[in-house]
Amino acid sequence: MRQSHLFTKTRKEAPRDEVSRNAQLLIRAGFVHKEMAGVYTYLPLGLRVLNKINTIIREEMDAIGGQEMLLTALQPKETWEASGRWDDAVVDNWFKTSLKNNSPIGLGWTHEEAITRLMTQYINSYKDLPIYAYQIQTKFRNEERAKSGIMRGREFSMKDLYSFSLTQEDLDAFYELAKEAYTKIFTRVGIGEHTFLTFASGGAFSKYSHEFQTLSDAGEDTIYVSRENGIAINKEVLNDEVLSDLGLKREALEEQTSIEVGNIFKLGTRFSDAFGLTYRAEDGEDRPVIMGSYGIGPGRLMGTVVEILSDDKGIVWPQSIAPYAVHLIGLGDQEPAQKIYEQLTAQGIEVLYDDRDARPGEKFADSDLIGIPTRIVVSEKSIAAGGIEVKERASDTVEIMSPETLLEGLSR
Amino acid sequence: MRQSHLFTKTRKEAPRDEVSRNAQLLIRAGFVHKEMAGVYTYLPLGLRVLNKINTIIREEMDAIGGQEMLLTALQPKETWEASGRWDDAVVDNWFKTSLKNNSPIGLGWTHEEAITRLMTQYINSYKDLPIYAYQIQTKFRNEERAKSGIMRGREFSMKDLYSFSLTQEDLDAFYELAKEAYTKIFTRVGIGEHTFLTFASGGAFSKYSHEFQTLSDAGEDTIYVSRENGIAINKEVLNDEVLSDLGLKREALEEQTSIEVGNIFKLGTRFSDAFGLTYRAEDGEDRPVIMGSYGIGPGRLMGTVVEILSDDKGIVWPQSIAPYAVHLIGLGDQEPAQKIYEQLTAQGIEVLYDDRDARPGEKFADSDLIGIPTRIVVSEKSIAAGGIEVKERASDTVEIMSPETLLEGLSR
């Protein structure tokens, strides 16, 4: 992509009412645009990052047997009355509206109800199970305050997988698979070493649920981390019983602020009971389906990466989710840079090529702000001297190499 | 994909209140699920078709310089007051709701306002133009009645591209490119020969807009087709002046019912005036940006394909958007079919493999209903006789061939 064609530009300042670091950087670098508090447009660079995160999530969900589908934002009242979650006194972040005939409808803030009702169409016999269905879809939550940028939106994308199993044992086994898949996702997007499996409150069907918490001052949660064991406990459930369950000592734990980047939950029969979702077992008895839910917010993940991996010059994207692999900066006469651009793109390498008529200092500052992992500077002078400047965004070292060495290195 | 793992099943009947043929077939075959009138979940098979349509649309939009982004569903009132389209007396299909602080917000039913406001951040100089930005996003329209299945939803996906040009001439030139791109899209999804460029009402800035209308009794529009010229006129604008403009004679036109599958519109300065979207020209003057908008509903396209290409046994997908390329049906002992399944998938061919323990008649009926273009029947008996049955969904001829010939033919 030629930067002169990209319709976004970097900005010196984010909107004054934007207090979160992730949104400030993402707005200044041209990844997102703020429509209103908690509501962000994804601009071309931002959508590329979001799509790469989504692809990683899809690969890991498909690998554990997930089938992708797409539920709806508009939700009929009746569906939610069945589970007792329609009332604003019970759920305080509904957006509600109505049809022309005055039937009330809500905007889905989660989809346990919708998918459980749907599955009553398709689950009859034990032979139909297990089912693991997921979607990457837009959720709407009427947050009182929305000050965390793209990490807590009023409109945001969510990957939610729901599992439907025959027995508690089957659920437990899939739950462990999902846990591993989640760990892989956080590792692949570059925040693995900062992210801890965290014990959180369960429900009627399991003592604990699990969150994945990423250490960051920008978070809204407080957790107690055992680095030795690679796990953590959410402050909300920290007590002697939990410590004893996990064999941990209070004094060995570090209090940390963190961002909840994922959560997995054993729902048991909470929703299958509400919707009469049963299966005919081999012995001819009807039994309730045992469910679990597994959520990750791709936008929140993107915001988290920005919060914890950026520096004072801008964003530092991991290779796996960077909008482009290479930021090619042409200085002066564009002919040599143009040639490198064509060679790189012909090799299938994703390149943002700064072909703009701008000062070198401006190009470098923009490149640091946008945060593409590898920066390549090409000018007539550098080529004449037999070299191209190559610098990793995360490092200060500039290497000079021949175009041939560069191409060989990148195509590896 | 093994059909025994696919969580959907075919159904004998669609919901009683479902009157449209496209939704009846898509629900019965397990492509979509009806949440309420005009609101449909895309099940795994349906999402595969929708994604293939989206990929075709993206390729054609990217080919004419489109940059993909993603605007928001939640829309602040202020944005729409600027253009005079907030009031329910002006726009009668808003869904509206409000934030916790009682600020009214609407659900975007189109995005001219949002993108024009956004572009005031990025367009300053003539050097910033042209810009062609598009999204594939969910729109919400509070339709009084929603009886056309996935062809007219209250919640539906839309590809909307907006062009921002320096001059009317530049807009005119891009408009012609968009027209060609649209023609390619309709051809690629398999409805090209049924689809006519149709002259429709323009606005303050152009005498006509253009619709792409696909002939079908399921449509809501009436058009007058000149097959000789390959164009049509929407009934709404048919008069002597239009006939004269196009050099057509009334008596040479056929009246037809049709589905509007796309529309392109020269907006001129309607929105740039409302939002003060100007650019500094080379001569130092500030001039308004000249806009155009270009829409296609991917879900409506999918519904249209079902309406016009299905037969009394079920859906007949064109290869380009079929959920799978091959429906492999194993009869009796699954071993021979299993082997073919592995060979086909190893070659990268997308296969739905009916490995279920079901009667042949049921498998054939399901296969016809689901509508995958090529059906392959494998049984111990057929293999022993040296053959595999191959049948195209759209034809009645069954061919017997060796596994080798089949693999060779499919990998072409």
Image (cartoon, coloured by chain):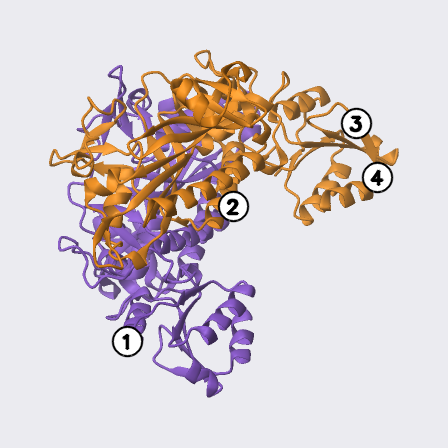
Chain colours: A purple, B orange
Q: Earlier in the sequence, mark 2 or mark 1?
A: 2
Q: Which residue is mark 3?
A: B398
Q: In the image, A52: left or right of A209? A: right
Q: Mark 2 to mark 4: distance in Å?
A: 33 Å
Give the residue at mark 2.
A62
Q: CA distance from mark 1 to mark 4?
A: 66 Å
Q: Position of residue B194 (x, y in %)?
A: 57, 26
- The amino acid type, in three-letter code, at marker 1 is Gly
Return the residue at label 1: A361
**Above or below, B35 relative to A383:** above
Real-space Cα separation, disc 2 to disc 3, in angstroms: 35 Å
Q: Secondary structure at mark 1?
A: helix
* Residue ranking furthest to the top: B16
Going 43% across and 45% down the picture, which residue do you hit? B173
Q: Around disc 2, counting alpha carbons within 10 Å, would you say few (fewer than 14), some (14 to 19), or many (20 or more)?
A: some
Against B120, residue A272 (above or below) is: above
Chain containing mark 2: A
Residue that appears at 43% across and 32% down: B297
Q: Are discs 1 and 4 both within one chain?
A: no
Where disc 2 sits, the SS reads helix
Crowd tier of the residue under label 4, counting other residues whose Cα lies within 10 Å: few below 14, some 14–19, many 20 or above:
some
Q: Amino acid at mark 2?
A: Asp
Q: Are the residues under marks 2 and 4 on the same chain?
A: no
The residue beneath circle 4 is: B402
What's the residue at 46%, 74% (across, down)? Answer: A335
| Image position of B71 with respect to A83: above or below | below
Q: Chain of mark 3?
A: B
